[in-house]
């Protein structure tokens, strides 16, 4: 098979070749690097370290890679690994890696309690049910969510996450207090297809204890595929300097705010 013929593989050809690329150990489709035994039988890189001989012929294993199999793997059109959960996208191996990292049908980890030991993983459609069942105090079921931080410590780093069930959608709210930079960071992210995130905005509302100072901040919702590091670095979130934040705290320890969710007009 020539390079040109590999590049022109049809979807039907691809289905047959994907079957040929099935690892004899784990039965998953092999992806580069693909290794072989002395007789040319292949196995995936994940299974090879645990083998003492070829699973097909019991021949000796070698460190030589099967370059033809790898070329086939790179050129075949693959279905997304989330097909069983509803994704019907098909693409090349290179594009598939990028897609599966942001696929809306991928498995999600617990958005509110993973750092506290929750090991749940499930579909996007199950996030709300899981949170209601296991972490109900971290759900806000309103388009206008009110927060009250008591015993607010400016000198202590703190991270907080919760779920907004608002506008008929699910959003992920995350807050970070950074005493070193003397800043409060907060962001709302859309859980679902990345292209839907910009359809929504969130509005922070702060009022001083005396009521004579008000602050309103509006920003576009970010996608759940955006990392906090990138969001904070590009300042595409709510950032409040401690000097300003102190104007809205009562007795230096209690801080209240509201976050309103709405669809872009």
Image (spheres, rainbow, N blue to C red):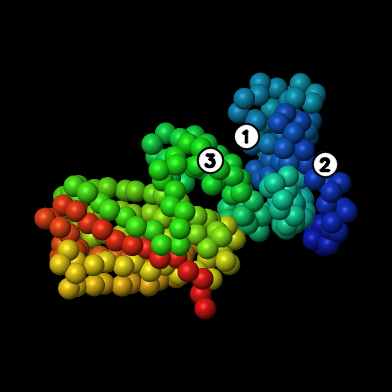
- Label 1: which residue? 46
Q: Which mark is residue 130?
A: 3
Question: Do the residues under discs 3 and 1 have CB atoms within 8 angstroms?
Answer: no
Taking the spot 83% from the left edge, 52% from the top edge, the residue there is 14
Residue 71: give x, y in percent of width and height: 74, 51
Taking the spot 62% from the left edge, 25% from the top edge, the residue there is 50
In the displayed structure, 19 sits above or below 39; it is below
Taking the spot 40% from the left edge, 43% from the top edge, the residue there is 137
Taking the spot 59% from the left edge, 41% from the top edge, the residue there is 122
Residue 21: give x, y in percent of width and height: 78, 41
In the displayed structure, 129 sits above or below 237; it is above
Mark 2 is surrounded, within 10 Å at the Cα level, by few (under 14), some (14 to 19) or many (20 or more) other residues, namely few
Q: What whole-number distance in Å separates the C-alpha atoms at marks 2 and 1?
A: 18 Å
Mark 3 is surrounded, within 10 Å at the Cα level, by few (under 14), some (14 to 19) or many (20 or more) other residues, namely some
What SS does tag 2 mark? helix
What SS does tag 1 mark? loop
First-in-chain label (2 vs 1): 2
Residue 29, picture quadrant: top right
Residue 57: give x, y in percent of width and height: 80, 24
- Label 2: which residue? 19
First-in-chain label (3 vs 1): 1
Q: What whole-number distance in Å separates the C-alpha atoms at marks 3 and 1?
A: 32 Å
Residue 139: give x, y in percent of width and height: 44, 48
Which one is in front, 180 or 164? 164
User: Which residue, as the protein is rendered here, is positioned at the far bottom?
Assistant: 265
User: Which residue, as the protein is rendered here, is positioned at the far front?
Assistant: 211
Which one is in front, 249 or 47? 249
**Tally of numbered tags:** 3
First-in-chain label (3 vs 2): 2
Q: Is residue 142 left or right of residue 150?
A: right
Question: Do the residues under discs 3 and 2 have CB atoms within 8 angstroms?
Answer: no
Mark 1 is surrounded, within 10 Å at the Cα level, by few (under 14), some (14 to 19) or many (20 or more) other residues, namely some
């Amino acid at each position: 098979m020539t390079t040109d013929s590999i590049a022109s593989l049809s979807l039907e050809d691809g289905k047959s070749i994907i079957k040929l690329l099935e690892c004899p150990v784990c039965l998953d489709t092999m992806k580069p690097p693909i290794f072989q035994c002395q007789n040319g039988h292949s196995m995936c890189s994940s299974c090879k370290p645990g083998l003492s001989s070829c699973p097909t012929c019991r021949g000796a294993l070698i460190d030589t890679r099967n370059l033809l199999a790898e070329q086939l793997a790179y050129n075949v059109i693959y279905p997304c690994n989330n097909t069983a959960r509803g994704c019907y996208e098909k693409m090349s191996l290179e594009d598939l890696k990028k897609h599966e990292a942001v696929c809306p049908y991928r498995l999600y980890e617990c958005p509110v309690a993973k750092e506290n030991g929750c090991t749940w993983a499930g579909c996007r459609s199950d996030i709300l049910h899981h949170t209601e069942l296991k972490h109900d105090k971290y759900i806000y079921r309103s388009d206008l969510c009110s927060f009250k931080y008591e015993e607010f410590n400016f000198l202590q780093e703190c991270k907080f996450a919760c779920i907004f069930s608002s506008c008929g959608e699910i959003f992920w709210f995350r807050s970070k207090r950074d005493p070193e930079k003397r800043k409060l960071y907060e962001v709302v992210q859309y859980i679902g297809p990345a292209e839907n995130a910009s359809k929504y905005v969130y509005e922070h509302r702060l009022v001083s204890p005396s009521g004579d100072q008000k602050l309103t901040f509006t920003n576009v919702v970010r996608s759940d595929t955006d990392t906090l590091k990138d969001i904070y670095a590009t300042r595409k979130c709510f950032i409040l300097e401690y000097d300003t934040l102190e104007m809205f705290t009562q007795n230096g320890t209690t801080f209240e705010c509201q976050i309103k969710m709405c669809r872009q007009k």
